[in-house]
């Protein structure tokens, strides 16, 4: 399998004795948190890029909306959405590349992880867009939702083939299909669990911080008109509702929580990728041979 040997061709003098073996459901979930805890500074440094850039863009946009006309604000909103999405995609790629090195017991710096993500960015962005066009397109109609779920899982492991195997955007989706084939339900269950765990941690921290800041008087706004408005003010209060100081504090806390939870999904997906390679391609044996 020479086309999938890129990791084996790396500098194996840096490889520690990491046990490469198939992982069950609990192994992946346990590894997700143990890797994050033992390499917290590495992941924190990577997500710091997300935190700083996202916060800067949001403050610029918030200040711009208080001065610009409504038409200009709409254009600025689109630009802000694109910019924040690009940053999120880049940082996620860096997290997954770093996670792969952590799994293999290799040293890597935050800068090296982000540099690799930047080098493969356009290919990675292409795979993200292909995945999104199909999955989101199918979700437009009710009858297409089951197919959207099916393809979102079947193609869901496209990131690491782009970053580690040097494949193209289209081939990354095919590569994911190869790995998921025959184990769709298992992969679906693990992906769902990873997503739910990450979301629940984010939701609990976000709700707790919103309640605490409200209790401190930092997010006071107009009386909400209903349940949805109450939730919106709790999670995403606007600048006009709470003022500059409260808005800045709220966004600092919210983005900090988002950055804190980002590595969870990245690490979990990386462990799932290697588990499938070990099960289907004897990747553990391949690595021992190349050592």
Image (tube, rainbow, N blue to C red):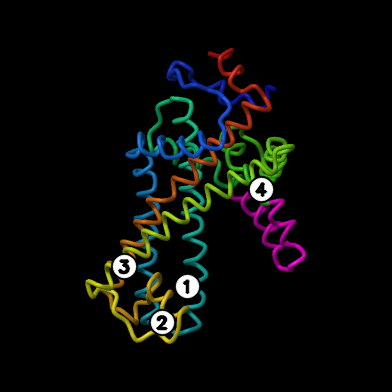
Measure how far apart labels 3 and 2 are at the Cα level: 23 Å
Whole-percent x, y for residue 115 in the image? 45, 39
Measure how far apart labels 4 and 2 are at the Cα level: 42 Å
Quadrant of residue 42 within the rendered picture: top left
| Looking at the image, residue 195 lies above or below residue 243 | above
Q: Of tags 4 and 2, which is closer to the observer? A: 4
Q: Of tags 3 and 4, which is closer to the observer? A: 4
Measure how far apart labels 3 and 4 are at the Cα level: 34 Å
Q: Badge 1 is on which residue?
A: 76
Q: Badge 2 is on which residue?
A: 68
Mark 2 or mark 1: which comes first in sequence? 2
Label number found at residue 31: none
Q: Of tags 4 and 1, which is closer to the observer? A: 4
Mark 1 or mark 3: which comes first in sequence? 1
Q: Badge 4 is on which residue?
A: 153
Whole-percent x, y for residue 188 in the image? 64, 46
Q: Of tags 1 and 3, which is closer to the observer? A: 3
Mark 4 or mark 2: which comes first in sequence? 2
Q: Secondary structure at mark 4?
A: helix
Q: Badge 3 is on which residue?
A: 250
133 is within the stretch colored magenta: yes
Q: Secondary structure at mark 1?
A: helix
- In magenta, the rendered stretch is 125-151
Q: Viewer-proximal residue, 206 or 26?
A: 26
Near mark 2 (Cα within 10 A), the count class, few <14, some 14-19 or many ≥20, is few
Mark 3 or mark 4: which comes first in sequence? 4
Assign the magenta stretch its main secondary structure.
helix
Q: Secondary structure at mark 2?
A: loop
Mark 3 or mark 2: which comes first in sequence? 2
Mark 4 or mark 1: which comes first in sequence? 1
């Amino acid at each position: 399998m020479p086309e999938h040997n890129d990791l084996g061709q790396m500098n194996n003098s840096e490889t520690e004795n990491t046990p490469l073996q198939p992982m069950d459901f609990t192994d992946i979930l346990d590894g997700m948190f143990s890797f994050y805890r033992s390499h917290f500074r590495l992941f924190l440094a990577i997500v710091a890029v997300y935190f700083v850039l996202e916060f800067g863009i949001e403050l610029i946009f918030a200040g711009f909306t208080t001065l610009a006309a409504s038409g200009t604000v709409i254009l600025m909103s689109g630009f802000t959405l694109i910019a924040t999405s690009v940053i999120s995609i880049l940082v996620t790629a860096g997290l997954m590349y770093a996670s792969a090195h952590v799994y293999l017991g290799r040293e890597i710096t935050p800068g090296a992880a982000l540099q690799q993500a930047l080098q493969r960015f356009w290919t990675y962005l292409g795979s993200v867009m292909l995945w999104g066009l199909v999955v989101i397109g199918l979700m437009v109609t009710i009858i297409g939702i089951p197919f959207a779920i099916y393809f979102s899982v079947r193609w869901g492991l496209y990131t690491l083939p782009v970053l580690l195997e040097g494949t193209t955007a289209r081939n990354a989706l095919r590569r994911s299909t190869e790995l998921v084939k025959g184990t769709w339900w298992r992969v679906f269950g693990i992906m769902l669990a990873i997503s739910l765990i990450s979301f629940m941690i984010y939701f609990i921290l976000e709700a707790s911080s919103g309640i605490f800041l409200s209790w401190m008087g930092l997010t006071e706004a107009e009386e909400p008109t209903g349940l949805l408005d109450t939730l919106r003010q709790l999670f995403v209060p606007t600048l006009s509702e709470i003022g500059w100081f409260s808005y800045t504090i709220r966004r600092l806390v919210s983005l900090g929580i988002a950055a804190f939870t980002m590595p969870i999904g990245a690490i979990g997906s990386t462990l799932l990728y290697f588990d499938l390679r070990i099960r289907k391609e004897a990747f553990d044996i391949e690595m021992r041979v190349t050592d």
